[in-house]
Amino acid sequence: MTTSRPVTAVLRGIRALLGSLILAGVVLNFANVVGRYVFWRPIIWAEEILVFIMIWCVMLGATLVTWENAHLRMDAVYQLGSPRVRRWLNLVSTAAFLVAGLFVLVQSTRVVALVASTGQRSVVAEVPMAIPYGAIPVSFALIVAIMIWRGRVWLRPGAGDRD
């Protein structure tokens, strides 16, 4: 699939953010190991922050997997099908994915709003819990946008042989 410049910039930004988060996690983990075993002073909030970093990495990674259409799937029927069958399978799977993604987006947005309204914070690092929970609606908003774009592409004539 061809991509426009804004889409390419967003994808590049997501990849850069993922790389930065992973690098920050490695640095924090290394600093915690040194602090714990060399200076006998661990960074007590490091484990909690590393979990939050991992949540964001997984959720942002899911958007890239969706963009690349690389989700695990059983595609024997798809591979054996004619271009017309492939087109319909693409449209049906995109519609199902879109409905599920919209549901998760709406529900996770409600949860983040509730958590933010209560002012809930993490136990040790005292990070507002809306930050780690926010990874879910952010990534699903991107996933829904991707699925809408993909569905639009597959509605075009001759789109049956594309993944």
Image (cartoon, rainbow, N blue to C red):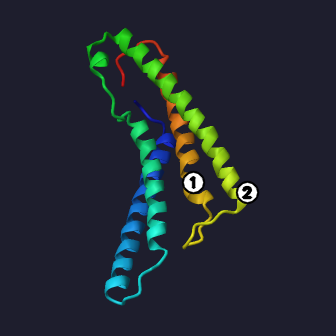
Tell me the SS state at disc 2.
helix
Q: Quadrant of residue 16?
A: bottom left
Q: Nearer the viewer, residue 92 or 45?
A: 45
Gap in Å between the C-alphas at discs 1 and 2?
A: 13 Å
Whether residue 103 is visible, yes or no, is: yes
Q: In the figure, is residue 155 to the left or right of 39? A: right
Q: Please tell me the numbered disc located at residue 133.
A: 1
Which residue of the protein is positioned furthest toward the front in this rendering?
123
**Residue 40 in the image: x percent, y percent?**
37, 88
Q: Nearer the viewer, residue 35 or 27?
A: 35
**Residue 116 in the image: x percent, y percent?**
69, 57
Identify the residue at image location x=57%, y=41%. Answer: 141
Q: Nearer the viewer, residue 75 or 157?
A: 75
Q: Quadrant of residue 109?
A: top right
Q: Nearer the viewer, residue 81 or 132?
A: 132
Tell me the SS state at disc 1.
helix
Whether residue 159 is visible, yes or no, is: no
* Mark 1 or 2, nearer chain start: 2
Q: Residues within 10 Å of mark 2 (few under 14, many from 20)?
A: few
Which residue of the protein is positioned furthest toward the right in this rendering?
117
